[in-house]
Amino acid sequence: MKTNFICTTCGVQQAATQAEPSNCIICEDDRQYVHWNGQQWTTQEALQQEYKNIIYAVEPQLYRLQTEPKFAIGQKAYLLQSPGGNILWDCITLLDEETKRQISALGGIKAIIISHPHYYASMVDYSLAFGNIPIYIHAADQQWVVRPDAAIKFWKGTYLELWDGIKVINCGGHFPGACVLHWPHGAANKGILLSGDAVQVVMDRKSVSFMYSYPNLIPLPKSDILNIQDSLAGFNFEKIYGAFEPHIAQEARAVFNRSISRYLQIFK
């Protein structure tokens, strides 16, 4: 019997195989790392015995999904409720019946949008659970998809128009296809940015960071910083929700601008 094994370090589910894969290409990339104890695998069924998902509101129409206790890199996803259909921004690994029930009670999911490969997680399982819904991934990151599926839609260019004014923006940096999502009606129509790791909210919540690799502390070149700046020109946002716990609760556009300027000073 073939199994979709899951890497315990990055949390990404692999294509089905008879035996455990020999390696995880996402962890072997220099933006991630192989566990110090070596490559290890688990399964969806095993996770369901040890972990549970917590789903809670962080804003009106915006819910955070996270797994407890912490699994892999501690990924968090967001469910955005919108009149045109709900969006799952990024993905977590664990999917159980209680998670399906809670998401269904919130209106289900119309589409899954992935910011970058460290959030591929169990995206195909989530798609299947909600009716083979589309998974949108930027084509620049296609090589990192380790569980191909017909539901995955690779898109190109800088902007992906969704519905209700929501846009996905390819700003690059962390990965060539790294994206953020702009929700113009969030924060009482002042705008919210769901930023993944492309625009990383840091612990002081007064600034954001931009890195090629966060765990290995590899910075981005100036050209990538400028591309992130240019791709978000003209977008207003009062708040930023990043890949992990902290968020920028007010004046996030100004925080972003100051952080860009600080980085550019380094290159002078």
Image (cartoon, grey):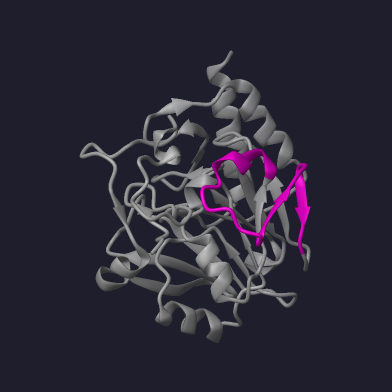
Quarter of the image containing the N terminus? Answer: bottom left
Quarter of the image containing the C terminus? Answer: top right
Q: Is 63 situated left or right of 113 in this image?
A: left
Q: Give the vertical position of 201 relative to 265 (above or below).
A: below
Residue at 37%, 66% (x, y): give it.
Answer: 44
Residue closest to the eye, 177 or 227 = 177
- In the rendered image, residue 143 lying in the magenta stretch gets the answer yes
* Residue 120 x, y percent position in the rendering: 51, 53
Q: Give the vertical position of 187 relative to 207 (above or below).
A: below
Residue at 65%, 69% (x, y): give it.
Answer: 133
* Residue 239 x, y percent position in the rendering: 58, 56
Residue at 47%, 84% (x, y): give it.
Answer: 101
Residue at 58%, 35% (x, y): give it.
Answer: 258
* Residue 107 x, y percent position in the rendering: 61, 82
Q: Is 118 situated left or right of 130 in this image?
A: left
Bounds of the magenta segment: 139-162
* Residue 188 x, y percent position in the rendering: 67, 69
Q: Give the vertical position of 266 relative to 252 (above or below).
A: above
Picture quarter containing residue 228?
top right
The outermost residue toward the top is: 268
Residue closest to the eye, 252 or 74 = 74
Please tell me how many numbered marks the rendered image carries.
Answer: 0
Picture quarter containing residue 47?
bottom left
